[in-house]
Amino acid sequence: MGTSSRPRPGNSFRLALSYSVTPTGTAVRKNIHPAWQTVAGSILLIGSDDKRDATPKRYREVSVAGKPRALGRQIGEEAREEVRGFCEVAIERVNQTVRISRQRATQIAQQSLVFAEDYRPDLVDELRGTAEAAGVDLNDLMLLQVRNQLTSEPDAGCTSLSVRTVAGSTLVAQTWDADPELDRFTIVLTRRPEGRSATMTCTQAGLISYMGFSETGIGACVNSLPAPSRPIGVPHYFTLRELYEATSLKQAVHAVERAHRAIPANIMLATPDGPADLEVTIDAVHVLRPDGQAWLGHTNHCVHTELCNINEQFPELIQSHARKRRLEQLITSGVCDIEHVKRILCDHQDYPRSICRHPNDDSGHGFWCTVFALVIEPTERRMHVSRGTPCCHEFEVYQMSSS
Ligand SMILES: [Zn+2]
């Protein structure tokens, strides 16, 4: 077994080694595939335990354009199977971690629709178009938008970071640690709404927005942030969609602030003003900026001084504090460029509860793993996405075309 080959699907080996980092760190690393290394301290060789090895390497790309209803219809036509499939299993998957009846879930969806319509009626019109074309009920499609209002974990786990690179641009990146069943509903979707900025997102089909970037130079990643919530309000994905239309950090913050929000969330940003992080609660939006450094890192607990007491009220979500410490150690261990960021997302310290997360025996969320990882370059209008754990799956490039 040479170091030039990769862990092969179906292997079950696991081998932990230690190594010394040279002063530059490069002499050791350059002969070892990124899938087999951490950035500092130890090497962990992991055979793939990912059941999705037979799936394609890339997510399907869908591109739509036009007025809201027509744009929505195109999504419903192009991604009909994914939208229908996601609607069919949404409640079942939510019930993996919390029990809620379909009747109650539908009630929350219907009541939140009122808030969504007030916030952005054009986006509700887009959902109507998608529902019509996919042949699903609008309430069922709306239920997808509010599914993270039904659980105690607002979204997925996740580790995110935003860095200003040595080249001067800002990257935003994350692992998306969640239910692997959602992989099959995931697409890379480019929207070109008439009169508004184009976006490219890596998203489950049927959601009004998710992680990605806009042509205005905003890139966004998201993490769960355990904090007080309420069942009804503007869905998180709606605020993300408006955030992508911002041309500055100030506008991005306003897009979230002006919504009557139901859930807390963390939104890691690359903006024209550099890295920023929004710790969003239902009461306020707290902005974190780099303090004497060129980066920000976040996991699944509050960092802002005004919110730290909230952490004591909620159980720690998938080893959030340990991952944050490791993330910061990794960020500062190398030159901040895109390859360094990719290596960080592959890190296996504390495997399987690592930044690159694998299934484990955790009673609540052991089935969660890194479903995909992404590195977003908003100014280049592209993102790099590994479909599956980034240790064992290549990052593929998705480029937004100029028109
Ligand atoms: Zn891994």
Image (cartoon, rainbow, N blue to C red):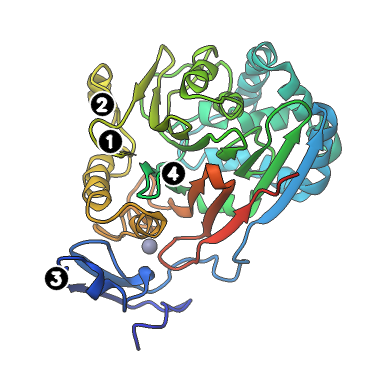
- Residue flagged by tag 4: what amino acid is it? Ser
First in residue order: circle 1 vs circle 4: 4
x%, y% of residue 135? 84, 38
Q: Earlier in the sequence, mark 4 or mark 2?
A: 4
Residue closest to the eye, 60 or 313: 60
Q: Residue at x 46, y 77 (%)?
A: 10
Q: Spatial distance from mark 1 to mark 3, Cα to Cα? A: 32 Å
Give me the C-alpha separation between circle 4 and circle 3.
Answer: 31 Å
The residue tagged with tag 2: helix, strand or loop? helix
Residue 59's place in the image compared with 30, above or below, is above
Earlier sequence position, callout 1 versus callout 2: 2
Residue 13's spot in the image, x, y percent? 33, 78
Q: Secondary structure at mark 1?
A: loop
- 230 lies above or below 363: above
Separation (CA) of disc 4 from disc 2: 33 Å
- Disc 3/disc 2 C-alpha distance (Å): 36 Å
- Foreground tag (1 vs 4): 4
Q: Residues within 10 Å of mark 4 (few under 14, many from 20)?
A: some
Q: Residue 25: where, in percent of width, then height?
A: 21, 66
**Residue 136, visible in the rendered structure:** no
Q: Quadrant of residue 145?
A: top right
In the image, ligand 1 is in what quadrant?
bottom left
Task: Report which residue position mark 4 lands on.
Answer: 169
Distance CA(mark 1)–CA(mark 2)? 8 Å
> Residue at (83%, 44%) from the top-left corner?
77
Tell us which disc is closer to us: 4 or 2.
4
Dot 4 falls on a residue whose secondary structure is loop
CB atoms of marks 1 and 2 within 8 Å: yes
Name the residue located 58 percent from the left edge and 18 percent from the top edge.
234
- Look at the numbered discs 4 and 2 and tell me whether their residues touch, using CB distance below 8 Å: no
Quadrant containing the C terminus is top right
